[in-house]
Amino acid sequence: MNNELLFTEQRPRRADAVKNRALLLETAHRLFTEKGVDAVSMSDIAEAANVGKGTLYRAFPNGKVELCHALLDKDQRDLQDRALLYFRNQSDALHSLRWFLAEVVEFVERNSALLCVGAVDAGLKSLEHPAHLWWRQTIRALLQRLNPQIDIDYAADVLYVMLDVHVTYFQRTALGYDTPRIIDGLTNTLHQLIK
């Protein structure tokens, strides 16, 4: 007899677990805003939320990385909603792609501290995160509309990699680029790619 589980779906969360998770996210957001992401430990979050570490790690079994991803979720969903609305109302693919690249740069800048947590350990795997792969798919679809004669996948990869938090962090800290320069550089790269 096969002993594998027949049902692989997770059980729904209990009401108190949902409430604790929301409290932990709110507490983490507040502490990160006050002290910075790197300066706040998981113990600090549990203590400030007045919950035990067991409660914290039941809500976020993978620790700080998972908690940071959960904090990013709302902003990422907002970006997706704005993009879908924008694309419905904008037929010009070039204008749409320039707008989208700028929006993603702003997202990365706004959330760089959260995106950097665990990014070193993840290495290039961060580029495989489903939310970020959506960026690549969006870029690819808009490039396809712009110029189907170019190597769409490679062009999409060039733009996509330039949006990675490692790259923008390096540009800001080591090279001194500000956000407008990063966006202008992406736009110029886009124009070179679609020639």
Image (spheres, rainbow, N blue to C red):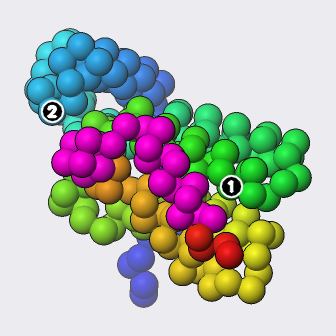
Measured along the vertical axis of the image, is residue 33 above or below residue 151? Answer: above
- Identify the residue under disc 1: 97
**Which is the main secondary structure of the residues drawn in magenta?**
helix
- Give coordinates of residue 176: x percent, y percent: 26, 41
- Helix, strand or loop at label 1? It is helix
Residue 38's tag is: 2
User: How far apart, in angstroms, are the residues tagged by discs 1 and 2?
Assistant: 33 Å
- Give coordinates of residue 12: x percent, y percent: 51, 41
Q: Nearer the viewer, residue 26 or 134?
A: 134
What residue do we see at 33% from left, 67% from top?
A: 125
What residue do we see at 78% from left, 41% from top?
A: 86
What residue do we see at 12% from left, 27% from top?
A: 39
Q: Nearer the viewer, residue 60 or 169?
A: 169
Residue 74's tag is: none
Instruction: Classify residue 24 by image quadrant.
Output: top left
Q: Nearer the viewer, residue 9 or 65?
A: 65
- Give coordinates of residue 35: x percent, y percent: 18, 18
Q: Nearer the viewer, residue 6 or 33?
A: 33
Q: Residues within 10 Å of mark 2 (few under 14, many from 20)?
A: few
Numbered disc total? 2
- Give coordinates of residue 122: x percent, y percent: 25, 62
Q: Earlier in the sequence, mark 1 or mark 2?
A: 2
Residue 135 falls inside the magenta stretch: no
Q: Which residues are magenta?
A: 170-191
Q: Residues within 10 Å of mark 1 (few under 14, many from 20)?
A: many
Q: Which-is-in-front pick, marks 1 and 2?
A: 1
Measured along the vertical axis of the image, is residue 124 above or below residue 57? Answer: below
Q: Is residue 172 left or right of residue 16?
A: left
Visible in this render: residue 63? no
What residue do we see at 76% from left, 76% from top?
A: 147
Visible in this render: residue 168? yes
Q: Amino acid at mark 2?
A: Asp
